[in-house]
Image (spheres, rainbow, N blue to C red):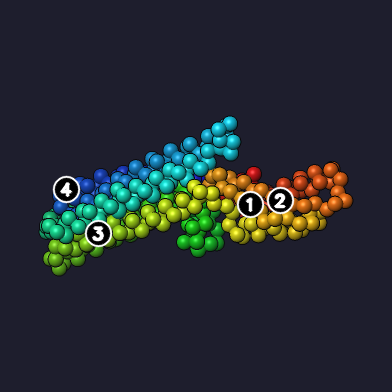
């Protein structure tokens, strides 16, 4: 899973860096607030990509005495930091710039620069999103897109998908803000576009922060995964009773599952050991169907 995250992250960093430079150049020549906000957005996305790479790299550190279950949650922590940066630097700055330009509107100049950069940015951003979606869809399966985002534990890849999707929507908003301002002559469209981009980023950041928070405080397996474990326990004749399995994610592809079961009274110690081995062997069923390792 880390490899897939890296591929999506590298693609996003390359695209966002090139796009940010282009947007800032266009903003300088045109004086567009929406374009400047989009430049900040892309710059923040580039920085976020490096933070996600740090999280992915640190999450692969081997377990030690201080962290007996490994460092898998590092990627959840850095993803949460990314969500905060999207909210504060991306959304907050864009809203601030938009309000400032609504209070002191200025007509746009050299509008063709905006169109050129926006179209190029859509192409590059679309290419980066395509790479991210390819990696995301490998684990999503047949789930609807939004449900797949909510259920996914690969927060690094989800962050790239969310950022790139928001970036494309932001580019469309910026395009229409420039276009409407040009054809109507109403100078407030540019500031409105910047505010809308900021609101979009705030909504995206809150959604992603909530998902990361659930993983940081100890999210377990999805109900359908727990039901699959219960089915395995029901089919084991030597298990007469059990409690609902307890689970906890220690990383995007590592989950701890605890089972509390009562064995039949007539079993010998060898029989119990054999039953435990049999139950542990069935974990391969879960690992074959889902992108995680059961411990």
Task: Locate residue 186: give its quadrant.
Answer: bottom left
| Residue under the image location 15 percent in, 49 percent down | 29
> Is there CB contact under 8 Å for labels 4 and 3?
no
Q: To which residue does mark 3 refer?
A: 195
- 4 or 3: tag closer to the N-terminus: 4
| Residue under the image location 16 percent in, 48 percent down | 28
Q: To which residue does mark 2 refer?
A: 260
**Residue sticking out furthest to the top:** 65
Assign a secondary structure to mark 4.
helix
Residue 187, percent across and down? 14, 62
Q: Please tell me whether mark 4 or mark 3 is closer to you in this view.
A: 3
> Is there CB contact under 8 Å for labels 4 and 1?
no
Using the image as rendered, state which of residue 210 and residue 294 is in the foreground. 210
| Residue under the image location 25 percent in, 44 percent down | 21
- 2 or 4: tag closer to the N-terminus: 4
Q: Please tell me whether mark 2 or mark 4 is closer to you in this view.
A: 2
Task: Answer left or right for 113 relative to 70.
Answer: left
The dot on residue 238 is none
The dot on residue 28 is 4
């Amino acid at each position: 899973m880390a490899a897939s995250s890296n591929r999506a992250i590298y693609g996003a960093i390359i695209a966002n860096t090139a796009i940010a430079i282009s947007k800032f150049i266009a903003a300088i020549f045109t004086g567009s607030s929406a374009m400047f906000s989009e430049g900040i957005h892309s710059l923040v996305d580039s920085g976020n990509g490096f933070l996600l790479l740090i999280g992915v790299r640190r999450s692969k550190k081997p377990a030690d005495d201080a962290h007996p279950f490994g460092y898998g949650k590092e990627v959840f922590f850095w993803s949460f930091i990314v969500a905060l940066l999207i909210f504060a630097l991306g959304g907050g700055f864009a809203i601030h710039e938009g309000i400032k330009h609504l209070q002191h509107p200025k007509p746009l100049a050299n509008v063709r620069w905006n169109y050129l950069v926006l179209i190029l940015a859509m192409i590059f951003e679309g290419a980066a999103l395509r790479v991210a979606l390819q990696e995301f869809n490998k684990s999503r399966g047949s789930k609807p897109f939004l449900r797949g985002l909510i259920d996914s534990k690969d927060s690094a890849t989800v962050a790239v998908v969310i950022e790139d999707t928001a970036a494309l929507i932001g580019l469309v908003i910026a395009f229409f803000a420039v276009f409407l301002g040009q054809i109507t002559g109403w100078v407030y469209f540019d500031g409105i576009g910047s505010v809308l981009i900021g609101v979009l980023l705030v909504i995206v950041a809150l959604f992603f922060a909530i998902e990361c928070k659930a993983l940081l405080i100890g999210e377990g397996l999805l109900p359908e995964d727990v039901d699959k474990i219960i089915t395995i326990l029901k089919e084991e004749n030597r298990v007469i009773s059990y409690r609902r399995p307890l689970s906890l994610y220690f990383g995007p592809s590592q989950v701890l599952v605890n089972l509390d079961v009562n064995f039949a009274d007539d079993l010998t110690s060898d029989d119990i050991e054999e039953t435990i081995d049999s139950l542990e062997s069935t974990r391969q069923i879960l690992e074959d169907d889902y992108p995680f390792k059961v411990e």
